[in-house]
Image (cartoon, rainbow, N blue to C red):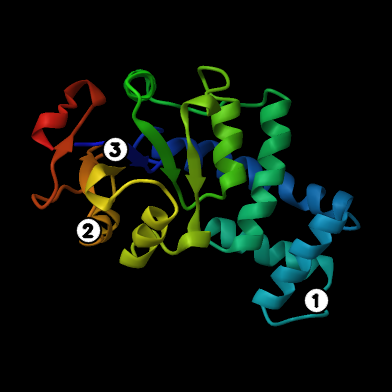
Amino acid sequence: MIKAILTDIEGTITRISFVKDVLFPYAAEHLPAFVRQNESDVLVKALLDAVRHEIAQPTANIDIVIVSLLAWIRDDLKVRPLKQLQGLIWKTGYQQGDFTGHIYPDAYQYLQQQHQAGTALYVYSSGSVKAQQLLFAHSDYGDIRSLFTGYFDTTVGHKKSVSSYQNIVNQIPFEPHEVLFLSDIIEELDAAKHAGLQTLQLWRDNQAQNQNHPFITSFEQFDSEKI
């Protein structure tokens, strides 16, 4: 019996292109000015120092730091200080109404239904917990954070690592077989399955399919009895 759902974000409940076509370009466009305007802020300064540590240049000037950050965005690298800086920039964008967090209509309806049925909903994304909460606080459907019981990011481990899912299960009051993991990425589903979770692939945006996991193309097709 499924008692909890752990869901990915990109390609699962929101379209991949939202991140790649909206969030990443917005961060790249606004990052240089944001960093220069806020480099004396305690949090931002710590993040910039973390960038210097990542590039092994502890005395790098702000121009070098900015170039490194923009290169990481271009190459879609999951570097923690970049993720945190992006979250700060996106917060401004959300608050100014420059964009809203995309949620597939069928995903929103599904999450609502599961929440109302008493199923605990958790999120696991490569984006920081702060970025996740920003998206849900400013979604196409308003603030939907109340639907979720908890949030996880890569501080628990890489999304393609079995131990990451074991770490998550150790932090929630459910057995692995009681948790259904939703994702569009086969390697993530494989890792979750090896950790004992049930799995379901969302086949959106022409993602590859794998017969090792049940799959649907829309949450309208969801049937818990076929998982």
Q: Which residue is mark 2?
A: 190
Q: Which residue is mark 1?
A: 60
Viewer can see residue 189: yes
| Element type at mark 3 | loop
Quarter of the image for the C terminus: give it: top left
Specify whether 29 is left or right of 203: right
Q: Which residue is mark 3?
A: 205
Residue drawn 80% across the image and 56% down it:
44
Percent from the top left, x then y, of residue 42? 86, 57
Residue drawn 22% across the image and 42% down it:
201
Could you tell which of marks 1 and 3 lies nearer the N-terminus? 1
Q: Find the distance from the CA under tag 1 to the CA under tag 3.
A: 40 Å
How many other residues sit within 10 Å of disc 1, few (<14), some (14-19) or many (≥20)?
Answer: some
| Element type at mark 2 | helix
Could you tell which of marks 1 and 2 lies nearer the N-terminus? 1
The amino acid marked with disc number 3 is: Asp
Nearer the observer, 30 or 158? 158
